[in-house]
Image: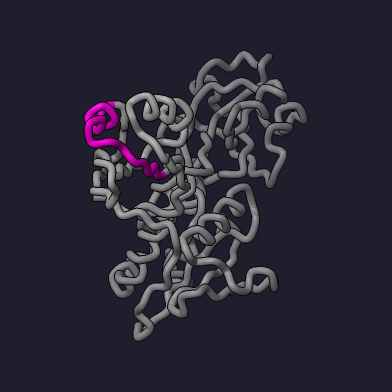
Amino acid sequence: MNTIITTEGRSSGDDLPYVVRLAIPNKGRISVQIFELMDKSGLHLLDAGERRLISRTPDPHIEVLFARPIDIPEYVATGAADMGITGHDMVAERGADVDELLDLQFGQATLVLAVQESSPVQSVQDLKDAKVATEFPGIAQSYFARQEIPVQIVQVGGACEATPYLGIADAIIDLSSSGDTLRSNRLRVISEVMKTSTVVIANHGARVAKSDKIEEIVLALESVIRARGQCYLMMNVRRACLTDVQRVLPGLSGPTVMQVAASEDLVAVHAVVSEDRVYRLINLLKRAGARDILVMSIERMIR
């Protein structure tokens, strides 16, 4: 059974003896999406506009720490923060011993090994004793160690794709989302190092000691993720047409059918469907006998 939330409510639990500190990026490619996710989950930031390092939320037992994405895994691993939201690549780069609780399904990218288009290098094996520039030295060292290929890692702080042209490196390991930046800089991918996306992480000890609140936060965030790309359909259907409507109506667990207090023999049909199917589905439902069709957005969805 699915629980749909279209309005927000404040949770109880004001008697908890602790506060959960959640670390999120203060800037970067995923920070805007994280702020939006926090808002939709009911954990909007009360002090974010004041450029504070720590912000309150509507829940007095949850506070938010702003930090660099690369520092968040270490903060969580050492207990400076109980939870964090950052890229999986950041967790791997720091080698942080944390629990990954939830993939938020945004910020997806691939860490790739690339060379100049004109380079004779065709495989990882061709890079023996080469220089490889990257912002991810930890991941790079581990990757080449697994391949048993000795290389010299050149750590850079940005503009990694320019290093082959400057003679600084023979190859790079860098993040790529669409591949456009690599192609525009005439770079060619020879291997995928790892895939990454935005994840929720937690400290081992906090996950046990503060399990109730941590599970509540994860559920709130997950409910927003589940609702993405979904919408809620409500319609009236003559009982004689119900079978035809059910035949064309998809749904997560099948439609909900309820009696309507009306002079006609009507039933109300509710269902959750993918947004990308609504345009065509509305016409099919009308033909099948549905009427008074409402399409509503879904803020959160809990299974």
Q: Residue at x 70, y 28 (%)?
A: 164
Q: Is residue 256 magenta?
A: no
Q: Position of residue 61 (x, y in %)?
A: 43, 78
Is 174 placed above or below 263 here?
A: above
What count of labels does the image hold?
A: 0
What span is in magenta?
Answer: 232-247
Is 218 placed above or below 258 here?
A: below
Q: Nearer the viewer, residue 275 or 126?
A: 275
Residue at the front extreme of this rendering: 263
Q: Residue at x 31, y 32 (%)?
A: 250
Q: Residue at x 64, y 40 (%)?
A: 154
Residue 53 showing in the rendered view = yes
Is 96 placed above or below 149 here?
A: below
> For residue 217, which quarter of the picture?
bottom left
Q: Nearer the viewer, residue 294 or 176?
A: 294
Q: Nearer the viewer, residue 69 or 247?
A: 247
Q: Residue at x 43, y 53 (%)?
A: 224
Q: Nearer the viewer, residue 51 or 231?
A: 231
* Colour scheme shown: one colour
Q: Is residue 241 magenta?
A: yes
> For residue 55, which quarter of the picture?
bottom right
> For residue 172, which quarter of the picture?
top right
Q: Position of residue 177 (x, y in %)?
A: 57, 33
Q: Position of residue 297 (x, y in %)?
A: 47, 47
Residue 92 showing in the rendered view = no
Q: Position of residue 53 (x, y in %)?
A: 62, 72
